[in-house]
Amino acid sequence: MYLALDYGKKKVGLAVGEKIAFSRGFLPNDQDLMRKLIDLISDELVHTVVVGIPVKDSGKDGELVPEIKQFAERLQRATSVEIVYENESDTTFSSHEKLKAAGASIKTSKAEVDGLAAAEILEQYIRNVQ
């Protein structure tokens, strides 16, 4: 099972799947995040965590990349799962657009966008490894 993370300073979007990605919403980026992710990895029998990395149009890493990689390395040490990185450019924007097209309210969009962005990251990764 794969777990995808759309890491943000306030929230971390989640998605799981093997051939199809399923949004699992988000977790607050707080002191309980690591423990909750470790539990999720164990419960879902996750073997690989796909971490979204923001890449600018210039091809350079976004400013949050060092923090994201540091977090991912801590998670890897705590669980021994494989960590892979996937370009997450435009996944949040695309998720907002999909929710808007589906007629979701702004409140619903804000609650769902992180998990959907993680699902897009995971779908992109799955397409690339097949």
Image (cartoon, rainbow, N blue to C red):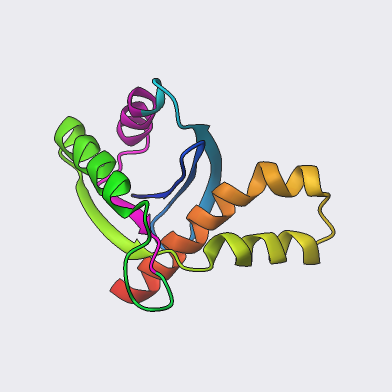
The residue at 40%/27% (across/down) is 33
Q: Which corner quadrant of the image does residue 76 belong to? A: top left
Q: Would residue 98 be visible to someone looking at this image?
A: yes
Q: Would residue 130 be visible to someone looking at this image?
A: no
Percent across and percent down for residue 58 are 38, 78
- Magenta residues, start to end: 34-55
The residue at 43%/64% (across/down) is 88
The residue at 32%/54% (across/down) is 65
Using the image, determine if residue 129 lies above or below residue 32: below
Taking depth in this image into account, of 129 and 60 the one nearest to the observer is 60
79 to the left or right of 42: left
Q: Which corner quadrant of the image does residue 94 belong to? A: bottom right
Which quadrant is home to the C terminus? bottom left
Percent across and percent down for residue 107 are 78, 42
Q: Is residue 49 magenta?
A: yes
Q: Is residue 102 magenta?
A: no
Using the image, determine if residue 37 lies above or below residue 126: above
Percent across and percent down for residue 27 are 50, 33
13 to the left or right of 44: right
